[in-house]
Amino acid sequence: MMMAAIGHGPAGDSVLSAVQQQQLATVLELLERDEHAPTAIRDPEEAARAHIADSLAALELEVVRDARRIADLGSGAGFPGLALAVALPHAQVSLVESQRRKCEFLERVCAAAEIENASVEWTRAEEWREGVSRNDLVVARALAPQAVVLEYAAPLLRVGGALVDWRGRRSAEDEAQAQRAAEVLGLRRQAIRRVTPFADATDRHLHVFTKVDETTPRFPRRAGIARKRPLGA
């Protein structure tokens, strides 16, 4: 098992404790054995790289390490939110997921791995009223085009909070559209950080946006509109 080798990377090089490693090992076990696990990657070694290490790469960022309230949008099988909840026991992590079966899986994982600082929110990001303006950090991985992710995230962030969006190969066109959307939403791009969460990882980038102004009350738009009519297009 490669869990013992996963640490905080260049930002701190602090290896996860034995308790944290066991929690993540339990997560991997559920991914392998639970027939309803919403992922195609079930092999523990592969999942440790593709899910756990990829999620923990964000610990290189100070805005992630310092966050106290985190929302993982479209959490799916629980990444990056579950891994960050384990690595950051001081933070409260909301796993926001719209599909009931995925939520039920997330609840089983949290219970089995004793991840007490994570909660499952069965709702769409656009309809999660309890989360509006309350989060220090919003994270998203393989969720939607970036302009759409920005619209989901902006209303949920407090001013000064940050979005970290996991992306693969960079696209100048997509980044330009996201920049236009950010200006409407009160967000500002701070960095695009290339990361290498495991040895043969390629084209992995963390896009970091900070909320610099209040988001206008017209956002979020009704569920589904962001995808149909993305900002900045």
Image: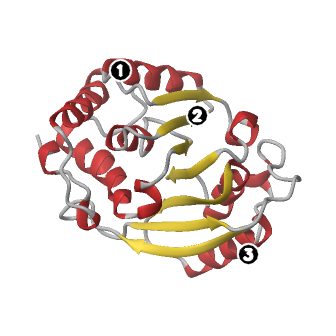
* Residue 151 coordinates in the image, percent (x, y): 72, 56
**Mark 2 neighbour density, 10 Å: few (under 14) some (14–19) many (20 or more):** many
* Residue 181 coordinates in the image, percent (x, y): 73, 69
Which of the two discs, 1 and 2, labels the residue nearer the N terminus?
1
Query: As shown in the figure, which amino acid type bears the numbered disc 3?
Result: Arg
* Residue 76 coordinates in the image, percent (x, y): 49, 36
Residue at the spot x=31%, y=40% of the render?
41
Marks 1,2: beta carbons within 8 A:
no
Query: As shown in the figure, which amino acid type bears the numbered disc 2?
Result: Glu
Query: As shown in the figure, which amino acid type bears the numbered disc 1?
Result: Glu
Quarter of image, res 8 = bottom left
Q: Secondary structure at mark 1?
A: loop
Q: Which residue is labeled 1 in the image? A: 35
The quadrant of the picture occupied by the N terminus is top left
Residue at the spot x=33%, y=22% of the render?
114
Q: Can residue 233 be seen in this snapshot?
A: no
Number of marks drawn: 3
Is 13 placed above or below 16 here? below
The quadrant of the picture occupied by the C terminus is bottom right
Q: Which residue is labeled 2 in the image? A: 97
Q: CA distance from mark 1 to mark 3?
A: 42 Å
Which of the two discs, 1 and 3, labels the residue nearer the N terminus?
1
Q: Nearer the viewer, residue 54 or 214?
A: 214
Left of 233 or right of it: where is 14?
A: left
Task: Tell which tag, 1 or 2, sits nearer the viewer.
Answer: 2
Q: Which residue is labeled 3 in the image? A: 180
Which of the two discs, 2 and 3, labels the residue nearer the N terminus?
2
Q: Nearer the viewer, residue 177 or 191?
A: 191
Marks 2,3: beta carbons within 8 A:
no
Q: Secondary structure at mark 3?
A: helix
* Residue 210 coordinates in the image, percent (x, y): 61, 66
Residue at the spot x=76%, y=61% of the render?
230
